[in-house]
Image (cartoon, grey):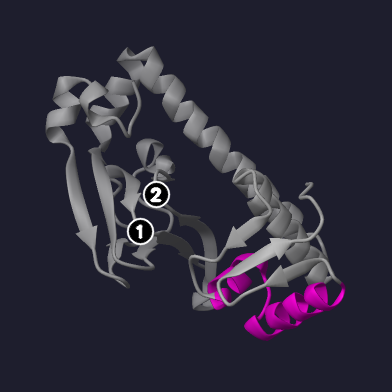
Amino acid sequence: MDLLTLDSLPVKLRDAIVHRDLAAGETLFQQGDLALSFFVVETGRVRLVRYTSGDKEVTLQIAGSGEGIAEIALFSETYPCTAVAEVNSRVIVYPKELLLSAIRNNPDLAEDFMAMLVRKIQDLKIRVELRDIRAAHERLLRYLRYQAQSEEQTVVNFDRPLKDIAVDLGLTPETLSRALTRLERDGMITRTRLSVTLVNSPAA
């Protein structure tokens, strides 16, 4: 039983699930809205951002296909962030109370949900680790190695603009461009417009 195999879910929950299509730039929910649903990205990409004092925007997550959005909603009255589709996307909408009830009564579903949370915690740990690497080219190289390691290959394909990857890494687009140039010059990578190949085998 898992959240993406809808036919395996309890009938009451399955019958209440809906799908929502989002156009690029469309908001799924806003920071402070009542937390009524949990979501899983079926296709596309959804960015989670939080606005701090002075309207500073902090990216918390870029959720792709199969990834959950706003798990905290199950235990909170309001959403702590805003979710915006980066590209045309489709999400699965799980009603909060019915999902909570299903998790309480189905150990397999609870285990699947916990596994999703563990993956998210691991992603957060990697994000924090990357931000602690001061040199831009070293930060970028570690990021590329993580990406290649997760895909068990040495080629990293860019499925979104480099300026968005720069934001994830806490770099300006110009700094990211210079870091790519340096890694290529140093023989650490080769690249095309939409992909990078690691010359040395990826290692975290």
The spot of residue 53 in percent (x, y) is: 53, 72
Label 2: which secondary element: loop
Whichever of callouts 2 and 1 sits on the residue coming sooner in the sequence is: 1
Where does label 1 land, which residue? Answer: 44
180 to the left or right of 38? right
User: What range is drawn magenta here?
Assistant: 162-186
Residue at 62 percent across and 48 percent down: it is 124
Say what amino acid the circle numbered 2 marks.
Ser
Q: Quadrant of residue 188?
A: bottom right
Give the farthest residue toward the right: 186
Label 1: which secondary element: loop
Q: Mark 2 touching mark 1, by CB under 8 A? A: yes
Label 2 Cα neighbours within 10 Å, binned few <14 / some 14-19 / many ≥20? some
Residue at 21 percent across and 58 percent down: it is 21
Q: Is residue 178 above or below residue 197?
A: below
Residue at 49 percent across and 76 percent down: it is 55
Say what amino acid the circle numbered 1 marks.
Gly
The spot of residue 89 in percent (x, y) is: 30, 60
Where does label 2 land, which residue? Answer: 65
Residue at 59 percent across and 71 percent down: it is 167
78 to the left or right of 122? left
Q: Is residue 101 above or below residue 31?
A: above
Q: Quadrant of residue 169?
A: bottom right
Of the 4 image quadrants, the one containing the N terminus is top left
Q: Is residue 90 above or below residue 56?
A: above
